Image (cartoon, coloured by chain):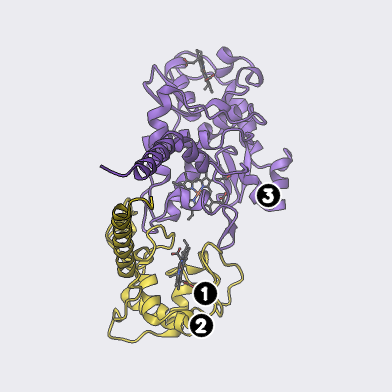
Amino acid sequence: MGRNPRSLRLVAAVALAAIVAGCAAGVRSASDALDTALTATPGDSARGREVIAGRDGNCLLCHEVPRTGVRFMGNLGPPLAGVGARLTPGQLRLRLVDSKRLNPESIMPSYYRIEGLVQVAAAYRGKTVLSAQQIEDAVAFLVSLR
Amino acid sequence: MLPRSLRHACALACLFVWTCTQIGPVFAADAERPSPLRSGIEFTSADVRSLQDDDFQNPGMLWVTRGEELWRVAAGKSGKSCADCHQRAETSMKGVAARYPVYDAAAGDVVNLEGRINLCRTHRQAAKPLVYESENMLALTTYVAHQSRGARVEGAVPTELRASFERGRERYRKRIGQMDLACTHCHQQNWGRTLLAQTISQGHGNAYPAYRLEWQSLGSLQRRLRACYFGVRAEMPPYQSPELLDLEVYLAWRGRGLTIETPGVRR
């Protein structure tokens, strides 16, 4: 290949363009936070714990979460101990609202999205899993996990 | 004109892509089947296993006994019982469940074991079909499937079943319900992990009809599948709908080689 410097330059330029384009796309999808709160009322950490440990959020199906007083917890997702130190409130909010914006393959349900769902049972159709206030409350609890 | 080295590189790349498209389906098919293949019973606790293993304790055996009685009861205008045509189920029904679902040319459709029993009811006995998931249907299905206990699931996909199989395969990967999850997310990608307190198995049908402690009753494979739909907050397809039959066809292929356990016991 070294025998033809011009074609080499061409290949290099194309590769560089591809890398730049790829990174730009990466940055866009990794705009990985929703910094604006969904409600005017600030999240309540105690209520957030109920959301997370109770039937509404059902997060313990997949996550080990400290301070819930529950014995059996699932492990399809990572343990959430210390998550408040790892992620900002905005990052946490985005993960609850719609984790598929970060990872389209994610198995974590989108807790505040109704578009794109199919074959939803009648009782839940057109409804988000959690309300906007429940998302804010859950974020407040997660922030406290440090 | 591209330099020679670049042409070579292109040719190699093309060859690679072509090879991938040729062997792709084989790879994909293997990645679809859990390895090593393990029955759901292996993921249950010791008390559930011992219930299943002991015929005197296995609650599902009640349905086997009831099915054995029904086998000899004449029904419909024909005045015939199952036994009148099939004699001893121990011989005539041995290995049958391991081959189901099948494509039935006369019906022009996929037929599972329950469907076959009802075809005999309507066409051979001139009797009313049994209601799906009724006690009598469960008893007869369990009795017939029990004759294949220990046999290996065949899971063959002959040409006539291909279309159904492909629909089932697609279905298995389709995200549904408010939880937006597909079968494959739990039973292929995450078997062996725990969902709250339950270990997720590979999701095979080899134990069904099975007695579930949660139901305090015996139920069909389709009842179990509907429970999974319910779990992801999805609309449940009706019993014997094409959607569930296609899934049964796919599940048989996915679990081929497993041993039939009917009547299984599950949490």
The disc, 1 or 2, on the residue closer to the chain's N-terminal end is: 1
Q: Position of residue B50 (x, y in %)?
A: 73, 46
Q: Which residue is mark 3?
A: B48
Q: Position of residue A60 (x, y in %)?
A: 52, 68
Of marks 3 and 1, the one in the foreground: 1
Q: What's the chain of the residue with tag 2?
A: A
In space, the residues marked 2 and 3 are separated at their CA atoms by 38 Å
Label 1 SS: loop
Q: Which residue is mark 2?
A: A145
Q: What's the chain of the residue with tag 3?
A: B
Drawn colour of chain A?
Answer: yellow
In space, the residues marked 3 and 1 are separated at their CA atoms by 32 Å
Q: What's the chain of the residue with tag 1?
A: A
Residue that lies at the very extreme toward the front in this rendered image:
A3
Label 2 SS: loop
Residue at screen point 51% across, 52% down? B189
